[in-house]
Image (tube, grey):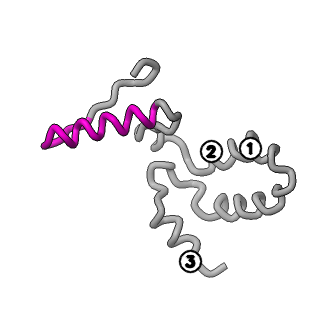
Amino acid sequence: MKGFTVQTATFLRKIDAKSWGQKTETAMREGKFFPEEKARQITLNDIIEKYIAETLPLKPNRVKDYTQQLGYWKNSIAHMPLSEVNSAILSQERQKPT
């Protein structure tokens, strides 16, 4: 798609390739596409900092709640590359005693 770097993948079946292509293009159109190479360079901390700077000011009633929660994640797994953060990691971290 115009404006994005070329993405490639290899599949055994044509149907899998078409499905991947459609999902990738949909994610690009919806602004949800994040190339894995970039996800390896960006840490969870980068995303948290961006959220604090850009989104948190729009939620003045919840700043205290969000600041506490974001602080927890910053102190635990924020050093991790975004490509390594998944639901299993988040679940495991939430279950640790505080």
Few, some or many residues within 10 Å of mark 2 (<14, 14–19, 20+)? some
Residue range (magenta): 9-28
Mark 3, mark 1: which one is toward the viewer?
1
Q: Nearer the viewer, residue 59 or 66?
A: 59
Locate residue 53 relative to residue 83 in the image: left or right.
Answer: right
Task: Name the residue carrying label 3.
Answer: 95
Task: Name the residue carrying label 1.
Answer: 55
Q: What is the residue that sits farthest to the right in this orientation?
A: 61
The residue sitting at 46% across, 59% down in the picture is: 86
Q: What is the residue that sits farthest to the left in this orientation?
A: 12
Q: Give the percent coordinates (x, y) of residue 31.
A: 53, 34
Q: Which mark is residue 23?
A: none
Separation of residues labelled 2 and 3 (CA atoms): 24 Å
Residue 93 location, quadrant:
bottom right
SS at mark 3 in the image = loop
The residue sitting at 29% across, 39% down in the picture is: 20
Q: Nearer the viewer, residue 37 or 79?
A: 37
Residue 27 within the segment the image draws in magenta: yes
Q: Is residue 14 above or below residue 44?
A: above
Mark 2, mark 3: which one is toward the viewer?
3
Few, some or many residues within 10 Å of mark 1 (<14, 14–19, 20+)? few
Q: Give the percent coordinates (x, y) of residue 3.
A: 46, 20
Residues under numbered marks 2 and 3 in contact, where contact means CB atoms less than 8 Å apart: no
The kind of residue tagged 3 is Gln
Separation of residues labelled 2 and 1 (CA atoms): 14 Å
Sequence-wise first label, 2 or 1:
2
